Image (cartoon, helix red, strand yellow):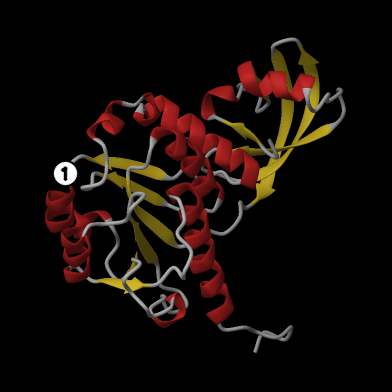
Amino acid sequence: MNLLLLFDEDFLPDGTARLTGRRAQHAREVLRAEPGESLRVGRLGGLTGLGEVLENSPGVLHLRVSLGEPPPPRAGIDLLLAIPRPKALKKVLPAVASLGVDRIVLVNAARVEKSYFDSKVLDGAFVRDLLLQGLEQARDTHLPEVLVRERFRPFVEDELDSVFPQGAVRLLPHPPATQPLRQVAAAPGQRSVLAIGPDGGWVSFEAQLLESHGFRPFSLGPRILRVETAVPVLVGQVALLGEDTAPRHDAGGT
């Protein structure tokens, strides 16, 4: 936990914050913070800063909070993800939150087992907790939005254009493709939407439907990756490529 996230309900009328539960336990048992010391904190959806420890007793952490720093910049990436195995999803959600993904649509696919939709991992509170873990790791405060859609074709045909922003470059990592990511990636300043299939990939119909809705296929390379590996690798590649191609300015601002 590299950042203690503060929620609106943590704040007292005097502006200090009172934390209980897991966060207070972490500050006491792991960080061993003493009164007068400062901890890195951030308000969910807002700024980051420092929290001076006023009290750190069993079950209660009382902080004087000073917030004035922005969280890390956003990656400019959204994700259309065929729902992976529940154990894999437990790894993927914290990872994409830590990487700065803004919106995640978990969608059904031909190679997705129906039982996945009954998993507790898709419970709203469970999803939120996994995302918060990713924010704590990355010192971020912006919670990604997660949507779940049980029907692939109706989502692509009826909702895709309204869910993902117009003008975003739609990217489809798909093994039959041969062109590399750099040939289809977004221009500087453009958003990207990554459509990542399940283990085994999208079936032909799904890939063709996505391509007909503007998704650009590209190759992941010769290695076959599990979803929990492919997702952070691809998000990281898209984000890094955007940084590498962005216009650079010298110290004089020219």
Residue placed most toward the observer, 154 or 231: 231
The image quarter in which residue 218 lies: bottom left
* Residue at left offset 12%, top offset 57%: 157
Name the kind of residue labelled 1 in the image.
Answer: Arg
* Residue at left offset 47%, top offset 78%: 188
Query: How far across and down, in percent of the image, does residue 174 sit?
Result: 33, 66
Q: Could you tell me if residue 75 is visible in this image?
A: no
Residue placed most toward the observer, 198 or 156: 198
Q: Secondary structure at mark 1?
A: loop
Considering only vertical position in the picture, is 206 above or below 56?
Answer: below
Residue 253 located left or right of residue 215: right
The image quarter in which residue 151 lies: top left
Q: Which residue is mark 1?
A: 151
Residue 118 located left or right of residue 79: left
Query: How far across and down, in percent of the image, does residue 88 sit?
Result: 45, 39
Give the total of numbered labels: 1
> As drawn, which residue projects farthest toward the top?
58
User: In the picture, which quadrant includes the C terminus?
Assistant: bottom right
Residue 129 located left or right of residue 212: right
